[in-house]
Image (cartoon, grey):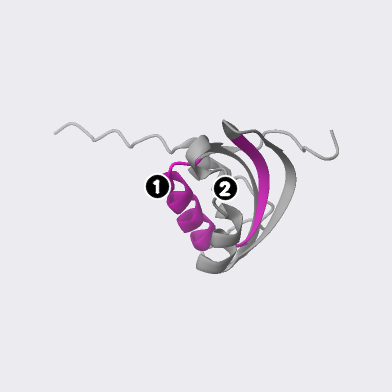
Amino acid sequence: MPKATPKKPSPARKAAQKTKAKPGTHSDQEQTTRLWLMYPGRLITTPVIWQISHQFKVITNVRQASITDEIGIVCLEMQGKRNVIKDAIKWLEKIGVSVEPVEINVIES
């Protein structure tokens, strides 16, 4: 019987794994994750980051942002339990926000 090929994780889920957490991380341990959020025009005036901080037990920190009438691009740092951050990422994707991992340090670069 052939083995099933595992699905490739989305870039946002990879970002949740690339964190400052200690080795041997469990889903209930605290971690910090940086993500690029790209908002479609219809969500520009929606307080998405406020909603994240109230719906999920995470601390948010906007590291960089650029907003126009057509698109919003935000570098967001989230601190919290790994499984909660993953749930927040899933929620963002569900409402139409594109989520990508931050590959370089935005402030120090």
x then y, percent, for residue 6 = 33, 37
Q: Residue at x 39, y 47 (%)?
A: 94
Q: Residue at x 46, y 57 (%)?
A: 87
Side of 108 where 80 appears, left or right: left
Residue 105, above or below 87: above
Please name the amino acid that badge 1 sits on: Lys
Tag 1 residue: 94
Q: How many marks?
A: 2
Q: What is the number of the mark on residue 1?
A: none
Crowding at label 2, few (<14), some or many (≥20) Cα neighbours within 10 Å?
few
x then y, percent, for residue 106 = 77, 37
State whether residue 28 appears in this view.
no
Quarter of the image holding residue 96?
top left
Q: Which residues are magenta?
A: 72-97
Q: Which secondary structure, mark 2?
A: loop
Tag 2 residue: 45
For the C terminus, the image quarter is: top right
Quarter of the image holding residue 54?
bottom right
Please name the amino acid that badge 2 sits on: Thr
